[in-house]
Each structure stands twice: as C-alpha cells, then as structure tokens.
Amino acid sequence: MTPDEWAKWTDHHATLFDLRSEDDLAMFAKWRPLLAGFSLADMTEASNWIAANAASKYRTQHAELLIRRVTFRRADQTRKRREQEDREREGPDCGFCHGVGLVIGVPHPRAVSDGVWTPPYYTCAVTCRCRRGADRHERFTAEATQSNGRCPLPMSLDYYEAIVPEWGQLVQDRENRRKDQDAANETAATADRRAGPLDLTAVKRRIADRMAADRAAMRQEAERLKQARDEMAAMQENATIPFPTR
Ligand SMILES: [Zn+2]
C-alpha cells in the first residue's frame, strides 16, 4: 500500500472498530510493517470480514486475523482460478469428445441388438459428460423445447450408456475391422501395382488342371474302393463255401 492507501485503510479500520485513541494510533504504526505489504482492497475486505465474522474484541487479535483472512482469500482465489482453468482445459482434452461436446459415431441404439451392432452400422451422436457437453445438452434441450417437437431432444452420454453399455467395445471392434480391411486392400493394391493385373487365362487353366486332377483322384479312389469291396466279397464267399464233403 502507498502511504495514501495506508492512511485510507487505517481510517477505514479505525472507523469500523472505533479505534481513535493515542494507543490505537501507536498500534497502527506498529502494524504497518506487518500489513502494508497487502493491497488496499485486500485489507479493506479483511477488516470488513473480521468485523462481521471473527471474534475480534481484542486489539491484539486484529493483526493476526487480518493476515489470516488476506492469505486465506488469496489461496482460495488461486484455487478457484486453477479449478476454472482445469474446467476450461477439460474441453479440448476430453477423451470422449475432444472438446466438441458431442460424442459422434456411436452405435445407434436401434442398430444394436443383443450386444451386436448390425449392418449397415447406423450411428448417432450424444452429448458428452464434460463441461462443454453439458453446455451443448442445455442448448439443444432449449432448442428442442422451443421447436415444438421439430428438433429432437438430445441424448446425454450417461443416458445412452445405460441403454448401450457396450458401445465403447463395439466402436473399437468396428474400427479394428475397418483397419484390417484397409490394410488388406492396401496390400492387394500394392501387389496389383507391382505385378500388374492377374492373368485370368492362366487362372482358368490352373482351375481346369486342378479339377482334372481332382477327377482323376476320385476315379482312383473309386477304383480302390471297388477293389476293396471285391476282395471283401471274395472273402465272404470263400468263408461261406462249405468244405467239399466226400
Ligand atoms: Zn467431452
């Protein structure tokens, strides 16, 4: 505090507590090194606060109470500012919506039956559970209410999760399948680029050869079966032929 501000504050404090004696003035002089480092606004607030809230009947308590009040408020303000900053940071850093306030591309509840997301994989968007999501939810709800049913009411992530609890896994699975498909397509395209298009005449010939080989194998197999059956029949015949009697 400047000397002017110090004078203003001492006057304010003296008026509040009626501290006008010689002793009181001496006391203010002793307080100066302890309290003059704080701002006029902080000290005025602290004076008002101890007058209203603290047991400040004795002068000896004032300096300590004032210091405690000012430092408490400063810490409180810092904490509140940090919390505010945290809440603001929550937006872009939110793992669900990345600051958009909406979680998009989640399986539509009607496209999920018995925990399976069915083709053609309809999706929907729900409002996120972060601060920005809550803002969106509020705004969409207001819009829906004003639209007389033309705009649908938004669904929150919490509500949605109660209906489709496995949505995270479903999205992950679908994403993985899509990645596998992309990877397969990519590999095939690379092979096409390197080796040129497939020679279908050669493919047809290979298929014909393969079928001919299969037919030959089947014929051989049938042949073997026939032979085996013949041998068995012969054995049975031999067994049933009675020994010639003399
Ligand atoms: Zn979010």
Image (cartoon, rainbow, N blue to C red):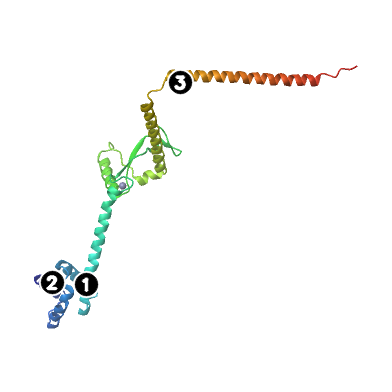
Q: Residue at x 39, y 45 (%)?
A: 161
Quadrant of residue 150 within the rendered picture: top left
Q: Which mark is residue 58?
A: none
Pointer 1 or 2: first along the chain? 2
Q: Amino acid at mark 2?
A: Trp
Pointer 3 or 1: first along the chain? 1
Most extreme residue toward the front is: 194
Distance of mark 1 from mark 2, alpha carbons? 14 Å
**In this view, 228 is above or below 167:** above
Q: Secondary structure at mark 3?
A: helix
Query: Disc 1 marks which residue?
Result: 67
Quadrant of residue 183 within the rendered picture: top left
Q: Amino acid at mark 1?
A: Ile
Q: Which mark is residue 9?
A: 2
Q: Residue at x 37, y 28 (%)?
A: 194
Quadrant of residue 59 within the rendered picture: bottom left
**In this view, 116 is above or below 1:** above
Q: Tell me: is circle 3 under 8 Å from ligand 1.
A: no
Query: Disc 3 marks which residue?
Result: 203
Most extreme residue toward the left is: 4
Between tags 1 and 2, which lies in front?
Answer: 1
Q: Check disc 2: other Cα within 10 Å, few if <14, some if 14-19, many if 20+.
A: many
Q: Secondary structure at mark 2?
A: helix
Name the spot of residue 8 as percent of width and height, x first.
10, 71
Most extreme residue toward the bottom is: 23
